[in-house]
Amino acid sequence: MASRLVLRIQERYSKLTAGEQKLAQLVLDRQDDILTHSATEIAEMAGVSKATAARFFQHLGYADFNEVKLQAREERNRTEPYELSVTNSEQMALGRTIGAHLELELKNLTRTFEELRSDKVREAAELIGEAPRVWVLGLGSEEGFARYARLLLSRLRHSVMILGINQGSWAEDLAMTGPKDVLLLITLPPQPTILKAILGYAKTSRLNVITITDRTTMLEMQRSSKVVLPCHVASFALGPSHTAVGSAIRLLALTYASVAGKSAQQRAEIVGSIHEELDDLS
């Protein structure tokens, strides 16, 4: 999180031009994008010129955008260890290990939901409500979360399916998709090469893509998604943390239940009664 940049913006916001204020608001909303995108890309996202972006950072007291990015990277390295080497267990007491893990997971959850926009969550839920079918996709480590999302949503609405559940069935599954279907994509970097082709097909077929991802790839995924729900996934080791991702999936399902109202409640009750009839949860 580029906290020093935020402080400078807050201090000088009223003195910025209208174009610079547009850029300032984008930076405030998407602070981590400073680390992953160029000044030109950020200017394009804000709808201002590259020259406006250059003046904006100079008005904040920076020599250029590279200085901004360097400062943001230094802050991140001090506060968000996305991947640190694993310490020998003999060198760290178990209580300290648990405490550090808990602190980082709580930070991930807090930052995710402080920055998550409620209007975007509701927009995603409404797209799910209007969709003839909902397809859920998670590749690699996110496959289990796709199954979790499918389970939650299928308790609330019909026609919720996992895309590519059978190995080698991408073409057959994609052939069943259609306009206004929703593709709920759960993905963290690095993305497999096939994802680009799947998203290309989804765009041509007019699917509405909802993506749950991390902050560093948010802007990239916005190019192919109707709604992006970014999560903080900082971790000490073993890849990114999925704690906030799982919680965001549940929030999306709860928001959909609120949007759908009685129909979602009725379906949940029917599913519950079928479980009782099958006696498969005892």
Image (cartoon, rainbow, N blue to C red):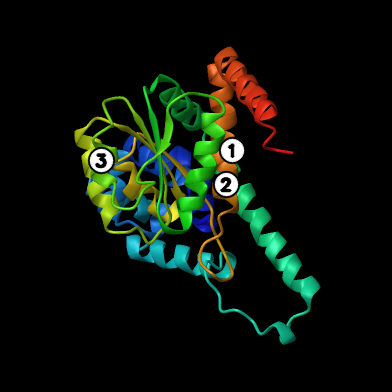
Secondary structure beneath label 1:
helix
The answer, for residue 47, to whether it is visible in the render is no
Residue in the picture at 68% in, 65% down: 101
Q: Is residue 278 above or below residue 230?
A: above
Q: Amino acid at mark 3?
A: Glu
Q: What is the distance, in whole Å, between disc 1 and disc 3 at their CAs?
A: 29 Å
Rendered image: mark on residue 67: none
The answer to which image quadrant residue 126 occupies is: top left
Q: Hey, which residue is sitting farthest top in the picture?
A: 262
Q: Residue at x 55, y 25 (%)?
A: 156
Q: Does residue 172 sit above or below 59 in this rendering? A: above
Residue at the disc numbered 3: 172
Discs 1/3, front = 3
Say which label, 1 or 3, has the lower sequence index: 3
| Helix, strand or loop at mark 2 | helix
Dot 2: few (<14), some (14–19), or many (≥20) neighbours within 10 Å?
Answer: some
CA neighbours of label 1 inside 10 A, class few (<14), some (14 to 19), many (20+): some
Amino acid, disc 1: Arg
Horizontal and vertical percent position of residue 106: 68, 54
Front residue of 76/223: it is 223
- Do the numbered discs 2 and 1 sit on residues whose CB atoms are within 8 Å? yes
Q: Mark 2 sits on what residue?
A: 246
